Image: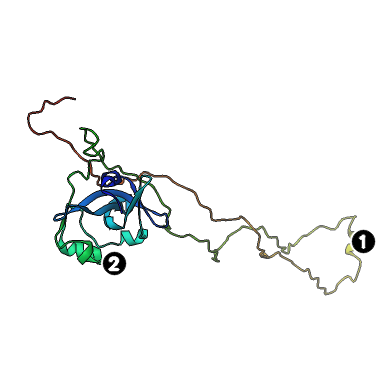
Amino acid sequence: MIGQEQVQQSIGSDMYSADGDKIGRVGQIYLNDTTSPPEWLTVNTGFFGTNESFVPISEADFSEDRVTVPFSKDKVKDAPNVAADGHISIEEERALYEYYGLDYGTGGSETHANVTTTGQDTSGPNTDEAMTRSEERVDVGTKAEEAGRARLRKYVVTEEVTQTVPVRKEKAVLEREPITEENVDRATDGPTISEEEHEVVLTEERPVVQKEAAPVERVRLGKEQQTEDQQVTEQVRKEQIEAEGDVDGRL
């Protein structure tokens, strides 16, 4: 258990579970209204330490600038939700005792508890006359999460292709030539008067289409990173110190 002389020293120190997991940072000490001894520690847990959970001092040990409790990190984080507003009602305290498996009849009183007035002065009332002012800082990081998926799919479409192809064809042409000394022998070879037929075969070209599949390109699915700035807004608390009475202000 944390001794009376270690109470103020534990404020601002780190709290660890029995198996060595860091739970958070000790924030405040709550005193019993009737018997005055400290009964509860608050520890900042959750994202950026924005949540405060209550832990019984009777189960905590302080050594080597750290507080150790016999509870797991999840056990402390899942403690009953009690607002760390300087006051614990009887119902809230009873719920905390039951949650940690403690006997409320012997481990606490039937009164409520208030936060000690020196809980936020990490320098302590017995060190010097100065008061330490603290404030919360925002630590913003990033984490990767799935935003979507892309895939490659190949399918077949049909389109018309038009090309111009030159084709040749033959046609019959009637040619006449006079009888001359050069062709008279061929012209008079045969009967003088007779009937005769002569046939010529005409040909023409027609377009012939042939298709073949040929590779034209390779397509792959890749990834590239883009960086953009996003604003993160978070509320932070900070302490202010002011003097009252007949005090001269100095910078």
Does the residue at mark 1 contact the one at mark 2 (Cβ under 8 Å)? no
Q: Quadrant of the N terminus?
A: bottom left
In the picture, measured across the screen, residue 94 lies left or right of residue 144, that is: left
Nearer-the-camera pick, 140 or 213: 140
In the picture, measured across the screen, residue 33 lies left or right of residue 123, that is: left
In the rendered image, the residue lying farthest to the left is 246
Residue 121, quarter of the rendered image: top left
The answer to whether residue 56 shows anywhere in this view is: no
Q: Position of residue 30 (x, y in %)?
A: 21, 52
Amino acid type of the residue tagged 2 in the rendering: Gly
Labels 1, 2: front one: 2
208 relative to 61, above or below: below
Nearer-the-camera pick, 193 or 123: 123
For the point 57% across and 56% down, which residue is it? 220
Nearer-the-camera pick, 75 or 94: 94
Mark carried by residue 185: 1
Mark carried by residue 41: none
At numbered mark 2, what does the secondary structure look like: helix, strand or loop?
loop
76 relative to 231, above or below: below
Residue 19, quarter of the rendered image: bottom left
In the picture, measured across the screen, residue 31 lies left or right of residue 100, that is: left
Amino acid type of the residue tagged 1 in the rendering: Asp
Q: Position of residue 194 (x, y in %)?
A: 85, 74
At numbered mark 1, what does the secondary structure look like: helix, strand or loop?
helix
**Mark nearer the N terminus (1 vs 2):** 2
Mark 1 and mark 2: Cα distance apart in space: 139 Å
Q: Position of residue 166 (x, y in %)?
A: 66, 57
For the point 17% across and 61% down, which residue is it? 109
Q: Position of residue 103 (x, y in %)?
A: 24, 66
For the point 15% across and 60% down, which residue is it? 89
Q: Which residue corresponds to mark 2?
A: 101
41 relative to 211, above or below: above
